[in-house]
Image (cartoon, rainbow, N blue to C red):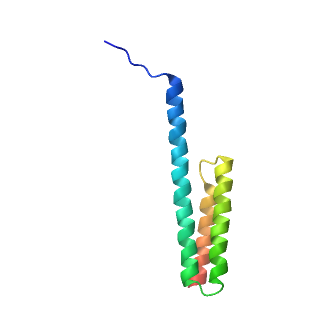
Amino acid sequence: MAENHAPTKDIQDHFESYRSFLRGVIVVILASAYTLVALCAFSFGHSFPLLLGWAVLLVGLIVILIDLRSGSRTWRLSLVMLLILGLLTAVNVS
């Protein structure tokens, strides 16, 4: 019977690729959420909708890049900022 053992280096490379893929998926999901909040600000905002929408997009991009560069596993900064900007947009819409 032939023994088929994968080298551990290949397994580690596979896990690193998988982690990178998951980080990319999280970045796309967060960017989509920030875009959704910005579109709500653009469409339904009462006071300064254009300014608020662009601010949400710009701040969201900066915060995502900070979390991405820091290697955070929880993405806490991006999620908290998304919550704050979402509430600010909700107040502006209502």
Q: Position of residue 48 (x, y in %)?
A: 66, 84
Q: Position of residue 4 (x, y in %)?
A: 39, 18
Q: Is residue 82 left or right of residue 7?
A: right
Of 77 and 64, nearer the camera is: 64
Q: Quadrant of the C terminus?
A: bottom right
Q: Is residue 6 left or right of residue 26?
A: left
- What residue is drawn where x is 62% and y is 56%? 76
Location of residue 51 by image quarter: bottom right
Q: Would you say residue 68 is visible in this rendering?
A: yes
- Farthest residue to the bottom: give it: 46
Q: Would you say residue 77 is visible in this rendering?
A: no
What is the total number of numbered labels drawn onto the structure image?
Answer: 0
Q: Does 19 sit above or below residue 75? A: above
- Farthest residue to the left: give it: 1
Q: Position of residue 84 (x, y in %)?
A: 63, 69
Q: Does 34 sit above or below residue 51? A: above
- What residue is drawn where x is 55% and y is 60%? 30
Q: Position of residue 89 (x, y in %)?
A: 59, 77
Of 17 and 72, nearer the camera is: 17
Q: Does 1 sit above or below residue 70? A: above
Q: Quadrant of the N terminus?
A: top left
- What residue is drawn where x is 50% and y is 40%? 18
Q: Does 41 sit above or below residue 83? A: below
